[in-house]
Amino acid sequence: MTSNPTKIQKRIAKKKGSINSLHENSRDSKRLRRACARAEKLEKLSTSRAKAREPFLRRIEFFQDAAREGEGRISIEACQGLIESYIDRFKTEVASIAAQRRPGRAASSREDALRHRVATEEHEYDSGYWLPDMENPENLDLLLRWDQDWASLSVLKFIRLSRQGVKKDSSFPPKGLS
């Protein structure tokens, strides 16, 4: 049985003539409501997945841009510098928001969110920051040709790089924060 609302509407229209002539609790109207509810649920699930993936896509996009600016493979020390600059991207905004706030006032929700994001990324960096392996020339070439799509990231190799310089292989998709 199909669960696509448009297909169900077509079938009911063929059988009954007009969708508007359905009784409120008829079998066809219940089937149509179920299909619409399922379609809404799937849309909501897809949206939440895309929202959860967005920070990882932005991160990889940052490292892709950094790889385009550099020549050849990128060393561990250079990767650590890139990680630190990526983590520090919100610090100027947090400082400006804090400077605009009157003394004694509570922090704004935007400031709290940015501070939380920076703290989370700092913690991840301490235990192992998830990023594409930029030392491997083949992987670097794949990263440069990446088309900003989540599904096409499966061909890349990823690592976890800690603040101490410890490099460990990682998997795609990332399994939470280290």
Image: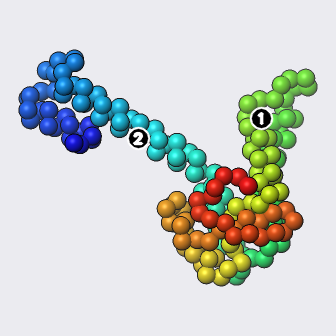
Q: Residues within 10 Å of mark 1 (few under 14, many from 20)?
A: few
Disc 2 element = helix
Name the residue: 35% across, 36% down: 38
Place of residue 132 in the rendered image (x, y in percent of width and height, measured from the top left)? 66, 68
Q: Quadrant of the C terminus?
A: bottom right
Q: Quadrant of the N terminus?
A: top left
The answer to which quarter of the image holds residue 19 is top left
Can I make out residue 69 in this image?
yes
Identified by mark 2, the residue type is Leu
Q: Residues within 10 Å of mark 2 (few under 14, many from 20)?
A: few
Between the residue at mark 2 and the residue at mark 1, the CA separation in whole angstroms equals 31 Å
140 sits to left or right of 70: left
Q: Which mark is in front, 2 or 1?
A: 2
Name the residue: 86% across, 23% down: 105
Name the residue: 71% across, 78% down: 135
79 sits to left or right of 33: right
Q: In this figure, which residue is indicated by the disc labeled 2? A: 42
Specify the label residue 112 is tagged with: 1
> Is the residue 89 above or below the residue 157 in the image?
above
Give whichever of 19, 35 is nearer the camera: 35
Disc 1 element = helix
The answer to which quarter of the image holds residue 164 is bottom right
Name the residue: 74% across, 76% down: 74
Place of residue 87 in the rendered image (x, y in percent of width and height, measured from the top left)? 78, 54
